[in-house]
């Protein structure tokens, strides 16, 4: 028996996309994914600045879970991912090709991008969403504004914990409480571009420094850029202490720190900064997901299981399994 109920998923990071992919195996109903970002992937982020590629979100994936390992290896086999041998010290580290966003595995057409969902309400047992143009609302906005879209039989939130907690509190659901327990560390990230041929280290893992990770983009598998790009991440403690600082001041401080640590002699051609307010969770719930069978509401995300891509993937699979078990279906793959 196939299930014909419709599902709305808010959040097209790895957790939401994985839940959708595994649900599709057992569903004939429509699955609609909304994301406020310009493209799917969430923290699986990459962008080009002046022609130079930067992976400014997750740096690599590691796998202890056999299913996630098989998922990564399938992507290596068909050229969408590769091992990153230079950084694989204790564990194999995998990267997406041509960039980390490739692991998001979803064409833009599969997701309603640029759509900020600010509220949901249930009427006659069905869910209705309030959807806004992401450019027109404040990032953390919760409330019944925008277009009312529905009905959906089931609703999945695949958001970072603080955003899920605020949304759940807004709609008065008790899952707000467990979600609000999880705190997430921020990460200020600076992208620095240098002229072709600029010499410098491939990877730095500084201790006792504002910086915690430095990667030369050109040492990533598949990178063929002539110009030299460095992605520089501040430590969680430094990022938290400077969370509300002016972005330009943060950029200047971190760029100076990078030059001092790396010994790179040239001045950057350009610099860009990204603040991840919710980069990685500091504690997790210890369960794959939350599922309210009565209200047909699910919550998933990396923070349910840990703080890595693997956790997001496993949480998405767990979400699909919870729903399919509820409807007596089983997950393949
Ligand atoms: C700087 C940085 C470095 C990292 N390094 C690593 C690493 O090296 N290895 C590793 O394994 N992990 C790393 N991580 C963690 C990893 O990126 C995450 O664990 C994983 O990507 C989380 O996936 P997710 O689907 O749970 O959440 P997300 O990717 O955050 O997806 C949530 C999505 O929800 C959307 N959204 C939020 N609110 C709304 C709304 N109201 N309406 C519509 N859409 C909404 C967002 O736009 C986002 O796309 C890193 C993270 C960061 C930020």
Image (cartoon, rainbow, N blue to C red):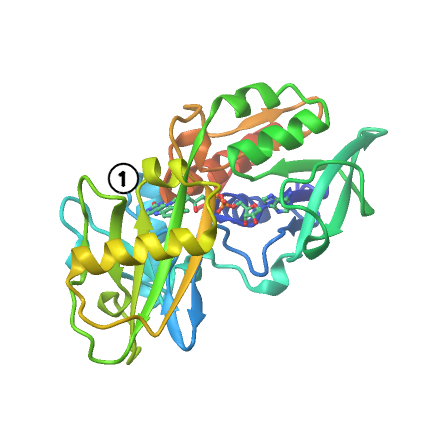
Q: Which residue is under mark 1? A: 64
Residue 142 shown left or right of residue 87 in the figure: right
Residue 176 shown left or right of residue 201 in the figure: right
Q: Residues within 10 Å of mark 1 (few under 14, many from 20)?
A: few
Is residue 192 placed above or below 154 in the rendered structure?
below
For the residue pair 62 and 75, the one nearer the viewer reads as 62
Instruction: Give the total of numbered labels.
Output: 1
Q: Kindly tell me whether residue 91 is visible in this rendering.
A: yes
Q: Kindly tell me whether residue 327 is visible in this rendering.
A: no
For image coordinates 38% across by 56% down, the residue present is 251
Residue 214 percent across, percent down from the top left:
25, 55
Residue 302 percent across, percent down from the top left:
44, 37
For the residue pair 120 and 124, the one nearer the viewer reads as 120
Residue 46 shown left or right of residue 6 in the figure: left
Residue 39 shown left or right of residue 264 in the figure: right
Q: Secondary structure at mark 1?
A: loop
Residue 166 percent across, percent down from the top left:
63, 30
């Amino acid at each position: 028996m196939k299930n014909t109920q419709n599902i709305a998923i808010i959040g097209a990071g790895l957790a939401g996309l994985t839940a959708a992919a595994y649900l599709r195996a057992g569903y004939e109903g429509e699955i609609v994914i909304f994301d406020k970002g310009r493209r799917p992937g969430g923290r699986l982020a990459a962008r080009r600045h002046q022609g130079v590629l930067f992976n400014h979100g997750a740096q690599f994936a590691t796998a202890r879970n056999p299913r996630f390992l098989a998922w990564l290896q399938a992507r290596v086999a068909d050229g969408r991912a590769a091992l990153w041998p230079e950084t694989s010290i204790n564990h194999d580290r995998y990267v997406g090709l041509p960039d980390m966003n490739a692991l998001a595995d979803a064409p833009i057409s599969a997701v309603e991008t640029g759509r900020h969902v600010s509220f949901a309400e249930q009427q006659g047992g069905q869910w209705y969403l309030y959807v806004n143009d992401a450019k027109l609302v404040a990032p953390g906005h919760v409330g019944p504004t925008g277009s009312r879209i529905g009905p959906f039989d089931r609703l999945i939130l695949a958001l970072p914990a603080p955003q899920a907690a605020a949304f759940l509190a807004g709609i008065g659901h008790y899952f707000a409480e467990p979600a609000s327990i999880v705190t997430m560390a921020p990460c200020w990230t600076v992208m620095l571009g240098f002229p072709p041929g600029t010499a410098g280290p491939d990877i730095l893992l500084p201790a006792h420094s504002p910086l915690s990770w430095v990667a030369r983009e050109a040492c990533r598998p598949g990178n063929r850029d002539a110009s030299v790009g460095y992605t520089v991440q501040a430590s969680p403690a430094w990022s938290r202490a400077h969370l509300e600082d002016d972005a330009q001041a943060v950029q200047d401080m971190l760029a100076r720190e990078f030059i001092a640590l790396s010994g790179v002699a040239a001045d950057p051609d350009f610099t860009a900064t990204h603040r991840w307010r919710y980069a990685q969770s500091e504690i997790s719930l210890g369960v794959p997901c939350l599922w309210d069978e009565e209200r047909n509401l699910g919550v998933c995300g990396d923070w349910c299981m840990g703080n890595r891509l693997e956790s997001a993937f496993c949480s998405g699979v767990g979400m699909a399994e919870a729903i399919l078990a509820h409807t007596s279906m089983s997950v393949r793959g």
